[in-house]
Image: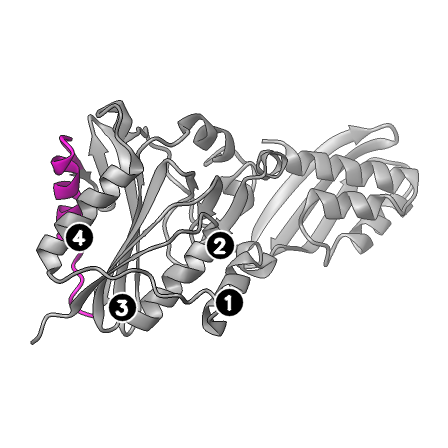
């Protein structure tokens, strides 16, 4: 069997939504016949796995305040923080030609070339000195197998701690949870290292392993297929609507009585609302149970609803919105 050609792509964009679309475009168009290395970096963002709940994984309020983008990838795995100090890599190839152990060995060799002493931990992580510097996720289709991951070079790890909140939320979610781990940058072990150093080392080792010359990224930004993918990755339906069903129980006391609200959420919208209260009037409770179902599960949407209703309902909706923002 003739070995597939080896192609290397680099993205000049730092937009996570475009880069996720570009990755899928490259995989669909090239990976069924070629071995692929795709190198890409992003501005500040949080990327969740395909089966995760963003409300359980991220501090969405802090992200919105700081202009940090939320994106959902098409593979599984946990939530990660990206910035320009983190390198993303994608290794892929035709079905049956892309081996995980081969890919990990390639990554380990690239790090050793930089004077580091990496180890493979568990199934998906690379560690140095007992701290995680790289995580991976995988996606297999009928035509190709892909392995993509992150390499922390000089990422703002404090920002990662601000925006990622695995296990901190009170939501009863059926989504996949991230696992907390001690993370580190490569610069903790090799001061002065730059993202370009890792990219160069990985490219050289991949070229040795797969042979051939890498090619530059074709001019495909105007391609209709790529534009369609970019719109999908940027859509609320993809980022929030794919969230597995979950419930949130909110309680508090208002000037007119105590209140407890159980929200069942599906596809990023409130599917059912059960409201309990010791207030003397049934009206506010009944109105809340009527108004909430079908509403987008977002503090802004709930506050907008409260602006058009009486003081008791408005106070309850503000309590709900505020509780959703708490971490």
Q: Position of residue 79 (x, y in %)?
A: 42, 43
Residue drawn at x 27%, y 35% as measured from the top left: 133
Answer with left or right where residue 233 lies relative to residue 214. right
Q: Which residue is mark 2?
A: 17
Real-space Cα distance between discs 3 and 2?
Answer: 20 Å
Image vertical order of residue 136 relative to residue 119, above or below: below
Answer with left or right where residue 258 lies relative to residue 250. right
Real-space Cα distance between discs 3 and 1?
Answer: 19 Å
Point out the frontmost of discs 4 and 1: 1
Secondary structure, mark 4, is helix
Answer with left or right where residue 3 lies relative to residue 228. left
Q: Which residue is mark 1?
A: 227
Neighbour tally class for label 2: few under 14, some 14-19, many 20 plus, Cα within 10 Å: many
Q: Which residue is mark 3?
A: 31
Q: Earlier in the sequence, mark 4 or mark 1?
A: 4
Picture quarter containing residue 311?
top right
Q: Is 149 in the magenta? A: no
Q: Nearer the viewer, residue 30 or 304?
A: 30
Q: Are marks 4 and 3 in contact (CB under 8 Å)?
A: no
Task: Give, as a single range, the part of the protein colored magenta.
Answer: 95-119
Quarter in which the C terminus is drawn: top right
Q: Earlier in the sequence, mark 3 or mark 1?
A: 3
Real-space Cα distance between discs 2 and 4?
Answer: 25 Å
Quarter in which the N terminus is drawn: bottom left
Q: Earlier in the sequence, mark 4 or mark 3?
A: 3
Is the image coloured rainbow, by chain, by secondary structure, or in one colour?
one colour
Secondary structure, mark 3, is loop
């Amino acid at each position: 069997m003739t070995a597939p050609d080896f192609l290397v792509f680099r993205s000049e964009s730092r937009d996570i939504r475009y880069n996720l679309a570009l990755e899928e475009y490259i995989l669909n168009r090239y990976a069924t016949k070629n071995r692929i290395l795709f190198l890409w970096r992003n501005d500040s963002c949080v990327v969740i796995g395909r089966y995760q709940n963003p409300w359980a994984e991220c501090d969405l309020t802090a992200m919105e305040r700081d202009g940090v983008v939320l994106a959902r990838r098409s593979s599984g795995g946990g939530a990660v923080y990206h910035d320009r100090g983190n390198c993303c890599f994608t290794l892929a190839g035709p079905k049956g030609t892309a081996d995980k152990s081969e890919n990990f060995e390639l990554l380990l060799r690239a790090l050793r070339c930089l004077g580091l002493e990496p180890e493979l931990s568990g199934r998906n992580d690379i560690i140095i000195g007992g701290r995680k510097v790289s995580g991976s996720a995988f996606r297999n289709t009928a035509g190709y197998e892909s392995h993509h991951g992150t390499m922390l070079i000089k990422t703002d790890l404090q920002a990662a701690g601000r925006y990622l909140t695995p296990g901190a939320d009170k939501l009863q979610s059926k989504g996949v949870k991230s696992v907390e781990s001690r993370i580190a940058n490569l610069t903790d072990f090799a001061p002065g290292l730059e993202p370009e150093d890792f990219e160069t080392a990985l490219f050289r080792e991949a070229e040795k392993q797969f042979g051939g010359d890498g090619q530059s990224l074709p001019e495909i930004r105007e391609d209709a297929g790529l534009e369609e993918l970019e719109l999908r990755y940027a859509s609320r339906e993809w980022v929030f609507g794919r969230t597995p069903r979950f419930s949130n129980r909110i309680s508090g006391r208002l000037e007119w009585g105590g209140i407890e609200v159980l929200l069942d959420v599906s596809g990023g919208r409130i599917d059912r609302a059960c409201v309990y209260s010791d207030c003397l009037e049934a009206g506010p409770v009944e109105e809340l149970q009527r108004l909430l179902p079908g509403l987008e599960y977002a503090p802004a949407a709930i506050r907008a609803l409260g602006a058009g209703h009486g003081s008791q309902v408005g106070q309850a909706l503000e309590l709900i919105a505020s509780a959703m923002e708490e971490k």
